[in-house]
Amino acid sequence: QVQLVESGGGLVQPGGSLRLSCAASRILFNNYAMAWYRRAPGKERELVAVISSGGSTAYTDVVKGRFTISRDNAKNTVYLQMNSLKSEDTAVYSCNAKSEIITGQDYWGQGTQVTVSS
């Protein structure tokens, strides 16, 4: 079955950096928009960043200039480079793959914890 496997989360001090990865399998990766979402304790899930199959990107305002989403179609992998991390970035980060061909077809990873704390 389709799998999205995130990695790269962990504990980092404020101002630090982390790079998340999401490796996809058993999908035609080139046909999917890829996105990172996060859910902080007690809050609703929010969209952090998205990259289309063609490489266009968009970010939620609070991460603009600090986070960068990218994809490597040869490796079926999407990345989220997170710099200048703040305590409010603490959340479970999840990867999402949404088909740009078939309406309503999307998949989720299991999530990876990011904790920003001194």
Image (cartoon, rainbow, N blue to C red):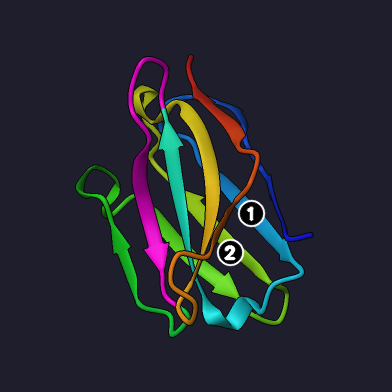
> In the image, 111: left or right of 50?
right
Relative to 2, say whether 99 is above or below. Answer: below
Q: Choose top left, top right, bottom left or bottom right for residue 45.
A: top left
Does 46 lie within the magenta span? yes
Q: Position of residue 67 (x, y in %)?
A: 39, 52
Does 42 lie within the magenta span? yes
Disc 2 packing (10 Å; few <14; some 14–19; many ≥20): many
What's under tag 2, amino acid-wise? Val
Residue drawn 64% across the image and 54% down it = 21
Residue drawn 55% across the image and 51% down it = 95
Residue drawn 36% across the image and 15% down it = 42
The N terminus lies in quadrant: bottom right
Q: Are marks 2 and 1 in contact (CB under 8 Å)?
A: yes
Bounds of the magenta segment:
40-52
Give whichever of 15, 104 is nearer the camera: 104
Q: Position of residue 114 (x, y in %)?
A: 54, 30
Tell me the SS state at disc 1. Answer: strand
Relative to 22, say whether 55 is above or below. Answer: below
The tag earlier along the polypeptide, 2 or 1, is: 1
Which residue is the site of mark 1? 21
Which residue is the site of mark 2? 78
